[in-house]
Image (cartoon, grey):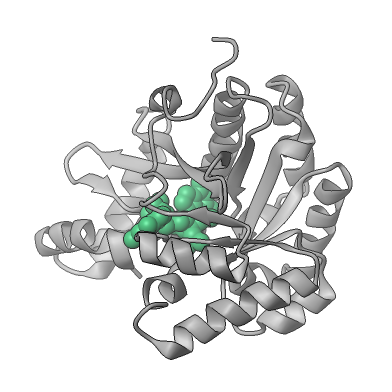
Amino acid sequence: RAKADGRNTARVYNKNLKDEETQRVRLARDLEAAIPANELRLVFQPIADTISLKIVAYEALLRWRHPSLGDIPPDIFVPIAESSGLIGAIGSWVIDEALRAASAWDPKVSLAMNLSPIQFRSVGLAAEICDAALRWDVDFERLELEVTESATLMGFQRDNVLATLEKLRKLGAKVVMDDFGTGHSSLGNLKEFTFDKIKIDRSFVATMNSHASSSSIVRATIGLGKSLGLIIVAEGVETEEQLSVLRRWGCDQVQGFLIGKPMDRFDLVGNGMVLVGP
Ligand code: C2E
Ligand code: MG
Ligand code: MG
Ligand code: MG
């Protein structure tokens, strides 16, 4: 399940544990202690306007520093949290912590958060997000809720998920289809549900300048998104070459190591970020 940047870390602890199941059980047990032990934290990665490179949002990304195994990537522990029933508590922590951070930012800058489809099983999810936004005095218009199409829109929760998202959307939050192109029925999902924004998966961006098929997919997605009136974001932008192609094709926003790596919330200052309040 580890992908791209998670691979190295995953290999390190794989060597030390007998098999994947032992590892999963151990991590699930340890993860339960992670919130009270303060081992979880959020980092924030900038999303910029493609033309001006002005930061328009930060995406909150979860990190877990395991006391003996070190950093475990979210591609490893989020699925464990989902299957072990811990994602509810962890997701609630993320919502509160992310909004707390955003309350100190320039109010023109939005907050993007990832939501697991399992979190939608709780009927209180919309209320929870509302409460946190009110508690931290962050306007709903600044919220961008990222869901992945395969997990969210093809599961048995589908109707629940769509109803909750529609509720949050009516309040002003934007709904974002994450990792676009990696699911199974992208076009159908776009037709059936109103998204505000789509993020082109970084696997397409990474091979855009070497594979004609990736570049066609990126270009076509930008065109499709535009014709549907959606904002298009490209993930995983690492080179100037990728940026200039995305500019030429009219991609609205970019995210990736070229623009900025995920940062601690205290390090956002001096990074084009104006802090207001404490
Ligand atoms: P995502 O939402 O698609 O997040 C983007 C991932 O791409 C992040 O990995 C980010 O660090 C990485 N990335 C950004 N720019 C670049 C780049 O230029 N090059 C490369 N190689 N990678 C780049 P990360 O932080 O490891 O997160 C992985 C996934 O874990 C996320 O994918 C998301 O699906 C999930 N995740 C992270 N935080 C949360 C959370 O709070 N809740 C839930 N449910 N899932 C989360
Ligand atoms: Mg995301
Ligand atoms: Mg993504
Ligand atoms: Mg992803």
70 and 173: which is toward the camera: 173
Toward the bottom, the furthest residue is 213
Which quadrant is the C terminus positioned in?
top right
* In the rendered image, the vertical position of residue 271 relative to residue 244, given as above or below: above
Q: What residue is drawn where x is 38% and y is 71%?
A: 206
* Ligand number 1: quarter of image: bottom left
Toward the left, the furthest residue is 15
Q: Measured from the top left, where is residue 74 in percent x and y? A: 39, 53
Toward the right, the furthest residue is 170
Q: What residue is drawn where x is 17% and y is 63%?
A: 11
198 and 95: which is toward the camera: 198
* In the rendered image, the vertical position of residue 56 relative to residue 85, given as above or below: above
Toward the top, the furthest residue is 278
195 and 93: which is toward the camera: 195
Q: Is residue 230 left or right of residue 217?
A: right
Q: Measured from the top left, where is residue 42 in percent x and y? A: 44, 36
Residue 276 found in image quarter = top right
Which quadrant is the N terminus positioned in?
bottom left
Q: Is residue 134 left or right of residue 252?
A: right
User: In this view of the protein, can residue 85 be seen by the observer?
Assistant: no
Q: Is residue 190 left or right of residue 105?
A: right
User: In this view of the protein, can residue 4 be seen by the observer?
Assistant: yes
Number of numbered tags placed on the structure image: 0
Q: What residue is drawn where x is 58% and y is 78%?
A: 219
* In the rendered image, the vertical position of residue 141 relative to residue 201, given as above or below: above
Q: What residue is drawn where x is 63% and y is 34%?
A: 109
